[in-house]
């Protein structure tokens, strides 16, 4: 969930001795997460997450990513580094990341000073709340798989299910009870739909302000962010895009589809050293079909 900005992020050891890896060699999660391009799905995930008022207020109060381009880039690089260690690292490296995440989460807690969406004033929130962790986890998994299928190739139903099962390794790393996270694509989508139907999600003015900052962290880079804006808003469900108040025209849709086609061709033609994270290349994973 929201990261505390009171330290410099996970201080990871660079020691690489004989090791036991967390994920299996033929892990679907590794095959998906090795693609650099899947990070283009994280904007979609973040806008889904900010639709939960308690997530939005936690991020607003405890993270400085929206305050400057430098802070946004620092948070992004730390998140990428953590993902790479959790996907391709040893048990020791993954454990080190997990400890840092749990420590950061313990610092993220508070109480609403005024009503926010369906939550009355006085409602407490904690980043280690299983319900909030599940929401963040599900939206991240959904957006990651959506990005992979958009820019790389379609996944089979079995591959989607395996990714969901493998991603449940996060339960132990976050100190959650087994079975907290969905173990199949059907369970994940059903849970997402149940949260949407529950009425807990609401695009608050705070979420709208933060969404604008996600799309353009500082005003002076706004003219340079059109591709990112297209890639973030284009994959959103129309109802979520409308709830945020973002306009989306037929011209935007055509530009989005052209950009997706361009990136997809680039991914297909890119050499492995460009396309994949260095850790994945060292592990020599099987090529994508």
Image (cartoon, rainbow, N blue to C red):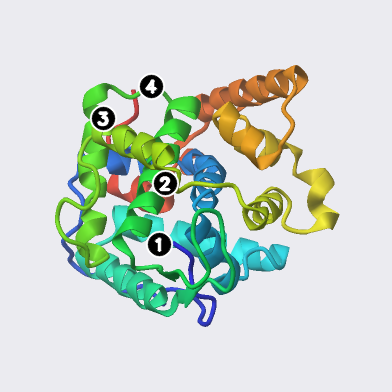
* Residue at the spot of label 2: 140
Disc nearest the viewer among 3 and 4:
3
Q: Does residue 99 sit above or below 200 in this rendering?
A: below
* Residue at the spot of label 4: 154
Q: At 21% from the left edge and 53% from the top edge, which residue is drawn? A: 180
Badge 1, how many Cα within 10 Å: few under 14, some, many 20+?
many
Q: CA distance from mark 3 to mark 1?
A: 27 Å
Q: At 26% from the left edge and 57% from the top edge, which residue is drawn? A: 170
Residue 84 percent across, percent down from the top left: 38, 56
Q: Quadrant of the C terminus?
A: top left
Q: Viewer-proximal residue, 265 or 109?
A: 109
Q: Does residue 63 sit above or below 225 in this rendering?
A: below
Q: Viewer-proximal residue, 249 or 165?
A: 249
Q: CA distance from mark 3 to mark 4?
A: 16 Å
* Residue at the spot of label 1: 82
Marks 2 and 4 close (CB-CB < 8 Å): no
Q: CA distance from mark 2 to mark 4?
A: 18 Å
Badge 2, how many Cα within 10 Å: few under 14, some, many 20+?
many
Residue 249 percent across, percent down from the top left: 75, 22
Residue 186, labelled with which disc?
A: 3
Q: At numbered mark 1, what does the secondary structure look like: helix, strand or loop?
A: helix
Disc nearest the viewer among 3 and 2:
3
């Amino acid at each position: 969930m929201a990261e505390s900005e009171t330290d410099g992020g996970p201080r990871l050891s660079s020691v690489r001795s004989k090791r036991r890896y967390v994920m299996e060699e033929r892990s679907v999660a590794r095959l998906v997460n090795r693609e650099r391009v899947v990070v283009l799905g994280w904007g979609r995930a973040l806008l889904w997450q900010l639709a939960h008022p308690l997530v939005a207020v936690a991020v607003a109060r405890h993270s400085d990513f929206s305050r400057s381009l430098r802070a946004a880039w620092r948070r992004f690089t730390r998140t990428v580094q953590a993902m790479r260690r959790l996907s391709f690292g040893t048990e020791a490296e993954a454990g080190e990341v997990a400890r840092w995440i749990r420590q950061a989460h313990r610092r993220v807690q508070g109480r609403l000073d005024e009503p926010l969406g369906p939550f009355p004033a006085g409602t407490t929130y904690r980043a280690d709340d299983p319900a909030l962790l599940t929401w963040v986890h599900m939206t991240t998994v959904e957006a990651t798989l959506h990005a992979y299928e958009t820019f790389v190739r379609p996944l089979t139903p079995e591959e989607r299910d395996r990714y969901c099962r493998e991603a449940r390794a996060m339960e132990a790393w976050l100190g959650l009870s087994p079975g907290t996270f969905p173990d199949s694509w059907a369970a994940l989508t059903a849970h997402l739909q149940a949260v949407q139907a529950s009425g807990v999600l609401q695009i608050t003015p705070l979420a709208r302000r933060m969404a604008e900052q996600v799309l353009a962290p500082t005003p002076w880079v706004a003219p340079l962010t059109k591709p990112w804006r297209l890639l973030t808003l284009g994959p959103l469900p129309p109802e979520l895009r409308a709830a945020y108040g973002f306009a989306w025209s037929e011209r935007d849709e055509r530009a989005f589809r052209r950009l997706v086609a361009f990136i997809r061709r680039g991914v297909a033609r890119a050499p492995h050293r460009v396309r994949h994270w260095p850790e994945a290349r060292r592990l020599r994973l099987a090529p994508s079909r």
